Amino acid sequence: MRSAWTADRIPDQHGRVAVVTGANSGLGLLTATELAGHGARVVLAVRDTAAGQAAAQRIGGDVEVRHLDLASLASVRAFAEKLSADHPVIDLLVNNAGLVLLGPRRTTADGFELHLGTNMLGHFALTGLLFDNLTAAPGARVVSLSSITHKNAHLDFDDLMCERNYKATEAYGRSKLATTAFGIELDRRLRAAGSSVLSVLAHPGLTRTNLTPRAWEHRGRLGQLIARGGLLVTQPVEQGVLPQLRVATDPEVRGGQFFGPGGPGEARGRMVEARLNREASDPAITRRLWETAERLTGVAYL
């Protein structure tokens, strides 16, 4: 039996350019730290550039901070245009950033439900706009960050933006199902095109990040108590980050593979290959989602 995969097994990353969204805290910060520590030039793609600069100082190494608001397609386009010009070859795109807000329904700058617009549609557009740069790299990878919440979610194409009977937990789960389906469909299309780019997926189980406190911030002091209670059942971020680090760097990982914790409910524990929601692996559903994302974002590729 092989020993558990750890960050010590990350290969040398010198000469590689990695882009990590949401890199100023939590899973994104630790992902960027490990990649930079192993020699990569890491672009911290963050909404709050002051927090990004503070993160860059903590990380050290060869890092740069750039503004990216995934809830605005104009911001995604501006980021991609400048990055593409400065880095014609991109080896790794880690679509890590995400949000969960359990208050009332909100929308992005483009009118999309905020969870879907940020967690999936923003990353769909970003990947497409950087696709030529990824293709220019030998063996480039795109990492999609899923969640165990995707397993009980459903893609209702008649109400994709959750305009009827909005429930924040369902909207978040739907956005993570859409993210997972995107990663699987991207893998199918890359294979069909004979591309050397790999689409890979990971989820962190229940991991101790700042997403939980932010999710409950609308409830004030009560929300703080609920968030603290929720953190008691989570695993350390150093454990939760391993699946995405592995799919980002392990030379043995194949396109379409999906890793996460293997403990009860896939919430914590040693890393294993994770199971997909049936909809995420249904080609008819993933194809329809892709075509819908193209129409909504105006970004078409593959």
Image (cartoon, rainbow, N blue to C red):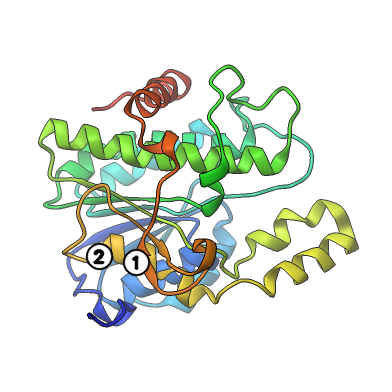
Left or right: 5, with 260 as reference point: left
Where does label 2 land, which residue? Answer: 249
112 vs 58, nearest the viewer? 112
Instruction: Provide the residue designation for mark 1.
Output: 245
Q: Which of the 4 quarters of the picture holds residue 134?
A: top left
Q: Which residue lies furthest to the right in this view?
A: 221
The amino acid sitting under disc 2 is Thr
Q: Where is residue 47 in the image (x, y as percent from the top left)?
A: 56, 51
Q: Residues within 10 Å of mark 1 (few under 14, many from 20)?
A: many
Q: Which residue is drawn at 54% across and 71% down?
A: 54
Secondary element type, mark 2: helix
Categorize mark 2 by other alpha carbons within 10 Å: few (<14), some (14-19), many (20+). Answer: some
Find residue 165 and report its image quarter: top right
Residue plotted at (21% across, 70% down) = 13
Type of the residue with mark 1: Leu
Look at the image and tell me in which quarter the C terminus lies: top left
Looking at the image, is 227 positioned above or below residue 146? below
State the image coordinates of residue 245 (x, y, percent, origin top left).
34, 66
**Residue positioned 49% across, 40% down in the render:** 177
Q: Position of residue 107 (x, y in %)?
A: 67, 31
Observer-nearest of 197 and 133: 197
Q: Do the residues labelled 2 and 1 touch (CB within 8 Å)?
A: yes
**x then y, percent, for residue 137:** 15, 50
Q: Is mark 1 on a helix, strand or loop?
A: helix
| 260 or 161: nearer the viewer | 260
Cα distance in 3D space between marks 2 and 1: 6 Å
Residue 149 in sight = yes
Q: Which mark is residue 47?
A: none
